[in-house]
Amino acid sequence: LLRLAPAAQTMLNGGRLEVHDAVSAQLARTLLDATVAHPRPLGGPSHRDVTVVVPVRDNPTGLVRLVSALRGLKVVIVDDGSTIP
């Protein structure tokens, strides 16, 4: 059982804790050490920041399946010397 002091409770915002000073860093360390919190970096890359590069050679059926599975992502297809480009 872990009980947070009122001061620690005020640092939590919707179940999230932003570390911005020594006090919040200590609270974060305590929660991590007790394995009741898991780090989640803020503002990391999203799927909109990713471009998938697909090398392909003589596999049009597989390419169609793959591209349809990657719907919504930016895709660059590189023909790696197909018999029929």
Image (cartoon, helix red, strand yellow):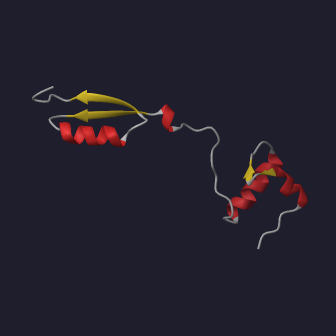
**Residue 40: where, in percent of width, then height?**
63, 49
3 on left or right of 78: right
State the image quarter where residue 67 is shown.
Answer: top left
**Residue at x 33% of width, y 40% of height:** 68
Quadrant assignment, res 30: bottom right
In the rendered structure, the answer to whether residue 29 lies left or right of residue 7 reads: left
- Judging depth in this view, the residue of 12 and 60 nearest the camera is 60
Q: Quadrant of the N terminus?
A: bottom right
Spot occupied by residue 38 in the image (x, y as percentages of width and height): 64, 57
Who's the residue at 70% across and 66% down the image? 34
Q: Is residue 31 above or below residue 74?
A: below
- The correct choice, above or below, for 35 with respect to 62 in the image is below
Does 39 sit left or right of 72 as displayed? right
Left or right: residue 67 versus residue 2 is: left
View extreme (right): residue: 6
Depth check: 16 or 8 in front?
16
Q: Residue furthest top?
A: 85
Q: Quadrant of residue 52?
A: top left
